[in-house]
Image: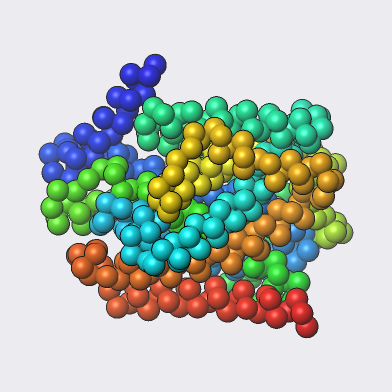
Amino acid sequence: MENIMKKMDQKTIARGQMVLNHTEKRRGFARLLPFLGPAFIASVAYVDPGNFATNIQGGATFGYELLWVILWANLMAMFIQALSSKLGIATGKNLATLISERYPKGFVWFYWIQTEIIAIFTDLAEFLGASIAFQLLLGVPLFVGAILSGIATIFILFFQDYGFRPFEIIITLLLSVIAFSYVTEIFISKPNGFGVLGGTLIPKFSGPESVYMAAGILGATVMPHVIYLHSALTENRIKAQNEDQLKRLHKFNLLDVLIAMGIAGFVNMAMLMMAASTFHFTGHQDVSSISTAYMTLIPLLGGAAGFVFAISLLASGLSSSAVGTMSGQVLMQSFVKFKIPIWIRRIVTMIPSFIVIFLGINPTNVLVFSQVVLSFGIVFALVPLIQFTRDKTLMGKLANGRFTNILSWMIASSVIALNAFLIISQFI
């Protein structure tokens, strides 16, 4: 079995090199397949349980009103992940490594500390989500669900030892479960087409509470830890031997981003549409927790809808928790050149979640708050990403053009402005 899984990597690299060398005879999707994977791992973080929490609350409270936030946040995420992917391809190094090499030592330590804080809040959302899913599916206490989540996540992480392809396949299968589940949920809940269209195309807020929710949606959609991770996933995967191959490799990775992030965007919008059509317009605007949403879904849409919801939450929690742990390991190695066994890191990062469970804090409130915290970490990842990808001496022919640079800073500025407004609104 071990040899089979390791051969998957070798075959993927060989097929990719044949495509770059123009010697691959197969056409269509077969040519693209070796390059698909990194963005699918990154995209899982965009459909983690934090998204369930913010989208359920957003849809139940404001109906279809915040769909435009999800749309634009996902477009921003596509753009950002494409930059991160390009950085790894062009430099052969990941974002955290470049920061550690080019920034003053004090800044490097600051970056590592703030990324560890981000990792804690990221894992809170992901691990608690998987724990809640086990609780809903098996009827066990949340504490038991947390133990099962830890065991399952460690099992998934062990596949990393056998190469990148087996891990990519497992994560992609879990992402497929989430996507299929929400195709089913949309079919069952039957959202209003005109309401969906208006919420998607017309930007609006309904006071500070909707801005707070929008910041949570942004934090849940544009995830800081995978901005760092994506460049690590592409830095040593399939390597280009010349500039022509480099450009072709970048184009294939763009397709990887568009497909994977497109699926993630659909799932996020489907979550909010389901919550809006099922809760907001049926007099259940007060549904604010994942558990309540599950219990309310069953009498409104039937047991099948509740089961599909719980299965999708479990797939989301386990996959994103594994990716989050993987990201934390990459960041530690890149910033401070220190490595611990990944199962030890998994156990350590579970501790805050167990504290939340023992204290009896509402898990969904923690999930939403964690996503707002994550939105503040986006800027710290974005600024060096933009700085490095515009550097022609570092990026060569893949350096950002003028339009890309302008768009990059517009996105960074919009995130900063939203966070500043959020802080001010909490004190007024």
Q: Does 358 sit left or right of 335 as displayed?
A: right
- Image height check: is 408 above or below 22? below
Q: Looking at the image, can residue 80 be seen? A: no
The residue that appears at 20% across and 64% down in the rendered structure is 396
- Image height check: is 356 above or below 75? above
For the rendered model, the colour scheme is rainbow
Q: Does 374 sit left or right of 259 as displayed?
A: right
Nearest the viewer among 396 and 263 is: 396
Nearest the viewer among 379 and 255 is: 379
- Image height check: is 80 above or below 298? below
Q: Looking at the image, can residue 376 be seen? A: yes
**Number of numbered discs:** 0
The residue that appears at 45% across and 78% down in the rendered structure is 410
Which image quarter: residue 179? Answer: top right
Which image quarter: residue 219? Answer: bottom right
The residue that appears at 80% across and 55% down in the rendered structure is 288
Q: Position of residue 235 (x, y in %)?
A: 31, 48
Quadrant the C terminus occupies: bottom right
Which image quarter: residue 182? Answer: top right
Q: Position of residue 73 (x, y in %)?
A: 54, 65
Nearest the viewer among 94 and 189 is: 94
In this view, the residue farthest toward the top is 1
In this view, the residue farthest toward the bottom is 428
Q: Position of residue 364 (x, y in %)?
A: 76, 51
The residue that appears at 48% across and 73% down in the rendered structure is 412
Q: Position of residue 268 (x, y in %)?
A: 60, 54
Quadrant the N terminus occupies: top left
